[in-house]
Image (spheres, grey):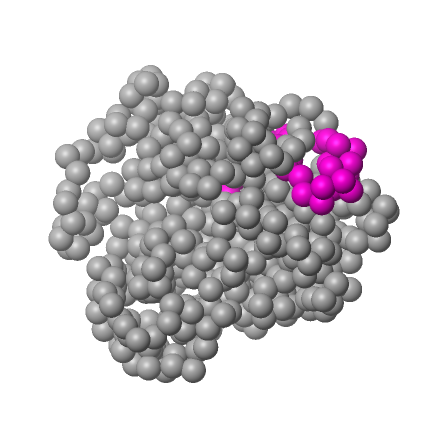
Amino acid sequence: MGNILGISAGFHDAAVSVISPAGKILFAGHSERYSKIKHDANLSIGLLDEAINYGLVDTVAYYENHWLKKLRQLIAGQPLSKTWSLASELRTQISHHDYLLHRRLASFSHHRSHAAAGFQTSPFDEATVVVIDAIGELDTISIWSAKYDEHGQATYRLRWRQRYPHSIGLFYSAMTQRAGLKPLDEEYILMGMSAWGKSNRCLQMVMDHVDDYSQLTFKDNLHTGVGNYWPTVSNEDIAACAQHTAEQLINKVMEIARSTAVSYAEQENLVYMGGVALNCTANRNLGGYFDNIWIMPNPGDAGSSLGAAALAYGKKLTWTNAYLGHNIPGPYPIDDILAELETNKIVGVASGRAEFGPRALGNRSLLADPRGGEIKDRVNEIKRRQKFRPFAPVILEELVDQYFTMPRNWSSGSRYMQVVATCKAPDLYPAIVHVDNTSRVQTVPNDGSGIRRLLEAWYARTGCPMLLNTSLNIRGEPMVNDRADADRFEEQYGVKVCS
């Protein structure tokens, strides 16, 4: 038997994943980091070249149902593509590796791929799986019972769904556009902007757009946006109201999920996937519904390349960490990083395997001392970011409760930067707190990783157990992938990048 190649492509954020016949994740990477085209919808040659170097491919798995997607496009009045079969759809993506079309081809529904990417990488043997995104083929919300049968095969039973055009994700994207940001790209900026606004008009936003709160239906098809909605209201207040409304709707989904659970394990364990799962401000509420929470660090469409491969494999995958992409070989450069932090307070690192997911977790990061009052502005200047946007801390996991008030049932930490917490000493760490004194925390367990050993050394030298951590990228481009990208970053911004 050969490897399984999972593919997500054709809409945005194309990606591939490779699983061995034994269920080990050999590789997972983003097309944009090879093509240098942000949110690249198509598979780049370099990405596929690297993926197939991991061995002979036996099965190619695709992340959505090709025909159902065409049905939704027809319903939505969208132009239909000219590809009328899975093979013809794939041919446009992998023509430079045409032999893959002669492998076994399999496709799965969009939301089931999301669900599998989460459940089959999770620590759970049984769980409730919730998927919330903008749109799949037709589903926009789905709730599943997931467990392994006596043969170890993953099984999924759909418990509840909502369908297009009723979509929390589309609502949030529409408000992202209304606030002057780019939909399907800058929703995370809207989330950060929300802390600067007032949500006292949230009830009016709900009345304007939500039809039936209990069934999560909307009055209008928000796929087309909301135009110049509330023209006299500031973008910050739009953001605050949109965030608050989205949180209330997500809470309702979790309430339905908890109430429809049919076993004790399903009532305790939550797997949460889909692009909306990246809203770490809303995620602080999840512990009010479930005791144990797993969000795979790439819950959006790119992560569904792994979900499709997982469904083709059928069983639990071996999950170790999110470092699954392109490798820059060599030991993690701890001494070089420390020297640069002590001298210049800011340093880049491009070492080891790249992160699979939208957030840098220490291998493709821009790191900084979080204690200086000027650090946030300096990093914002380097990144060419809006000054209102927050930065995240990366901290030794066993010390997180001394510095942050973690939300309920997140006490074990947030290893993939998935939830916000309130900083207990914001005046001491001004570079990593937002205007509301919260931080999007990344905790690092005692796992022997490079970032863990760096934090240990930094703590021993300074007494500070955390660093500011943001992605290493040139504005308008994806994260640094290889050493050539790192050299360009170093040259353009004058920041040393250690490898």
Q: Does 430 appear above or below 112? A: below
Residue, x 61% and y 25% (percent of image)?
Answer: 328
- Quarter of the image where one finds residue 382: top right
Residue, x 71% and y 31% (percent of image)?
Answer: 332
Asked if residue 234 is among those painted magenta in the image, a careful observer would answer: no
Q: Position of residue 238 (x, y in %)?
A: 37, 71
- Quarter of the image where one finds residue 61: top left
Residue, x 66% and y 28% (percent of image)?
Answer: 499
Q: Is residue 344 visible?
A: yes
Q: How many marks?
A: 0
Asked if residue 333 is among those painted magenta in the image, a careful observer would answer: yes
Q: Does 361 appear above or below 36? A: below
Q: Is residue 309 visible?
A: no
Q: Position of residue 493 (x, y in %)?
A: 56, 36
Q: Position of residue 183 (x, y in %)?
A: 33, 54
Q: Relative to the observer, which residue lies in front, 147 or 235?
A: 235
Q: Is residue 116 left or right of residue 332?
A: left
Q: Relative to the observer, which residue lies in front, 69 or 241?
A: 241
Residue, x 73% and y 52% (percent of image)?
Answer: 466
Q: Is residue 431 left or right of residue 60?
A: right
Q: Residue furthest right?
A: 460
Q: Does 364 appear above or below 201? A: above
**Residue range corresponding to the magenta coloring:** 332-357
Q: Relative to the observer, which residue lies in front, 296 or 457?
A: 457
Q: Position of residue 287 (x, y in %)?
A: 58, 68
Q: Does 6 appear above or below 403? A: above
